Image: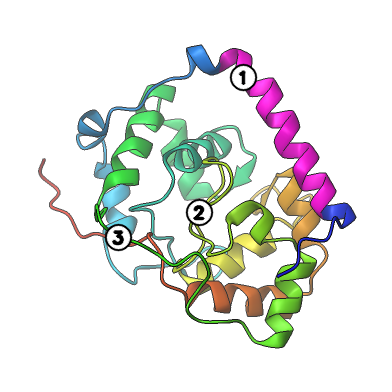
Amino acid sequence: MNKLMTPLFALAVASVTAFTLTATPAAADEIKGDAKAGALKIQMCLGCHNIPGYQATFPEIYKVPKIAGQNEKYIANALTAYHKDDRKHPTMKAVAASLSDQDMADLAAYYSVLGKVADANLPETPAKAPSADVAALITKGACTSCHGTNFSKPIDPSYPKLAGQNADYLYVALKAYKTEGNGRVGRNHGIMSGVAKQFSNNELKAIAGYLGGLDGDVKTVTESRFH
């Protein structure tokens, strides 16, 4: 994967820099999540994210995302996006609407460490190399510039780990960044919308299929409903 300074890559770098600069003054006031408190708030999550291979049916049939081991800040930001309607999904919007900022931070803290293996070491580059076609797509999208060369070590904790995520979920998520003007489907994100719109749906499916086949940290952990 080369790191040529494409216009999109430059946009990504500029956006990350701008985010960092604007976020720094508020860092002292950032809500801290408590994993132990989060363990007592997971009841609404268990119906979908507690079951390996569980499939959602909206906006199409796909396996719900693996969230155990995902980046804490990314989980909190995703829940906030559903709360603010920057991510449109009726079920997740209803769940997020019932949560306070502290609830979201606690859930994020809990799931970020759930199932985590202390000595787990992923290689710096994936053991499974992409095909030439997929490698070209990944380079075109400058994917590694944000999500890391192994897609499990993003450059910023607000970005998700992608390696090993359910491929059909990734495909639906990527398509959502291309959707505009739909009150029930779509995701509003300046960088990812620009990335996704470069590709056809078939190309997005190819990228998602590759990422889903990699070794990664994210997983589904079956838990008791009683904590």
Query: Which of the 4 image quarters holds residue 16?
Result: top right
Q: Which mark is residue 24?
A: 1
Q: Which color mode does the image show?
A: rainbow
Q: Which residue is mark 2?
A: 153
Q: Residue at x 26, y 34 (%)?
A: 35
Question: The disc labelled 1 sits on which kind of residue?
Answer: Thr
Query: Which of the 4 image quarters holds residue 34?
Result: top left
Q: Measured along the vertical axis of the image, is residue 201 above or below residue 100?
A: below
Q: Which residue is mark 3?
A: 120
Give the crowd class for mark 1: few <14, some 14-19, many >=20 residues within 10 Å. few
Q: Nearer the viewer, mark 3 or mark 1?
A: 3
**Does the magenta run of residues contain 227?**
no
Question: The disc labelled 2 sits on which kind of residue?
Answer: Lys
Point out the tag, 3 or 2, that comes first from the N-terminus: 3
Q: Is residue 193 visible?
A: yes
The span shown in magenta is 9-26
Mark 2 element type: loop
Q: Residue at x 79, y 68 (%)?
A: 140
Looking at this rendering, what residue extends furthest in the right direction? 7
Number of numbered tags placed on the structure image: 3
**Does the magenta run of residues contain 13?**
yes
Q: Position of residue 58 (x, y in %)?
A: 52, 63
Q: Label 3 to label 1, Cα distance in Å?
A: 31 Å
Q: Measured along the vertical axis of the image, is residue 25 above or below residue 14?
A: above
Point out the tag, 3 or 1, that comes first from the N-terminus: 1
Q: Position of residue 169 (x, y in %)?
A: 52, 66
Q: Label 3 to label 2, Cα distance in Å?
A: 13 Å
Q: Quadrant of the C terminus?
A: top left
Q: Position of residue 53 (x, y in %)?
A: 34, 72
